[in-house]
Image (cartoon, helix red, strand yellow):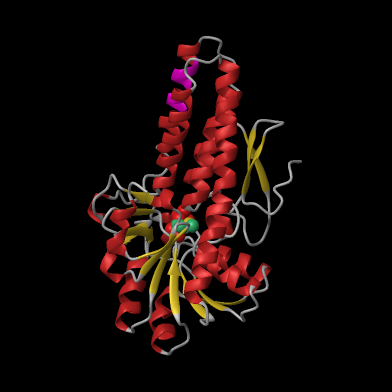
Amino acid sequence: MFDLKGQTAGYDTENEALVIIDQTLLPAREVILSLTKKEEIFAAIKELKLRGAPCIGVSMAIALSVLSARDHENDKQSFYENFINNCSYLVSSRPTAVNLFWAADVMKKTFSENLSKSIPEIKAALKKRALEILDDDILRCRKIGEYGAELLKGKTSFLTHCNAGRLACIKYGTALAPIYVLKENGADVKVYADETRPLLQGARLTAYELAKAGIDTTVICDNMASYVLSHGLCEAVITGADRIAENGDTANKIGTSGLAVIAKHYNIPFYVAAPFSTVDFGTKTGNGIEIEMRDGDEISEMWYSERMTPKEAKALNPAFDVTDSSLITAFITERGVIAPEKLRDMKDR
Ligand code: MRU
């Protein structure tokens, strides 16, 4: 069995497979899945077996390489068409995280740059690029952790929403990376994790990975955030991002924008940690970000032995919301800490 070596996703190049931890089974069971077919990769993204914007991006790159490596087509035009069809099919799995589209574009560019080469050479180039994207994510998250730890030095109590940790990336995470680095540096850190209804990424995943790392973790229901922030229990809020528009408006897990409003009210800094691949300069403001709508059953049935709400009541289940850039104190990125109004200046750097 391929060894993920503590990473959330990996590329089994010997067997041409995308290897992931099934996040729907955590924290009860750590089950590793080896995915080779486009339908099972699509389902894994849609069903949140693999999730978190950076992890989705890296997995997309690996998936496109795996599917190309497994394609026995000898005609280059047909091989190219299969590749493009795989891109279109997989990006239709979830609409909000830009990393999925970003990774598809990077892989398409790699294909185009190697168009004059033989099919085996193109396959090798795609594999090399996918592995670079994987390694790159680890480095970017480490940098986010280091810049974040510098920014937050002296602070020890944090609140986070959803899971923007190791499980949402390959290693370290984004929002949780500074916390891991602070801990490494000897700080006695404490984290409040919003449970994050309806899919409980905070209660199940953030609590799982922080506890495993020996970090003092307290799970709260989402509606307790105002209590925690108003009682001085935490000094900063840090979340991840699924897509950041050019003006700094940020889409992240549903509930993030409410948290930012509360943080502003109580004068607690609100940071968004994300790699630059999450910034979408093609989207001017948050109004241009498509929000994924998910099945209402996730609210009314999923976690209950019997349906929890009356059948007559509908359920609205937007998976993300957009936080206005005016509520964000700063972005913590692999290029440093950036004020929302300065994001635009980073476009061509
Ligand atoms: O629906 P999910 O679990 O994929 O949503 C994840 C989030 O909203 C994360 O905060 C975001 O992707 C950033 S992960 C570093």
3 in relation to 251, above or below: above
- Residue 83, percent across and down? 48, 24
Residue 81 drawn in magenta: yes
Residue at 46% over, 62% down: 307
Q: Residue furthest right?
A: 1
Q: Main secondary structure of the magenta part?
A: helix
Q: Residue furthest top?
A: 75
Along the line of sight, the residue nearer the viewer: 297 or 203: 203
Q: Quadrant of the N terminus?
A: top right
Residue at 43% over, 48% down: 277
111 in relation to 11, above or below: above
Q: Is residue 221 visible?
A: yes
- Residue 150, percent across and down? 51, 72
301 lies left or right of 338: right
87 in relation to 231, above or below: above
Q: Is residue 176 visible?
A: no
Q: Which residues are magenta?
A: 79-86
- Residue 112, percent across and down? 44, 23
Residue 265 drawn in magenta: no
14 lies left or right of 222: right
Q: Residue furthest bottom?
A: 231
Along the line of sight, the residue nearer the viewer: 36 or 309: 36
- Residue 176, percent across and down? 54, 66
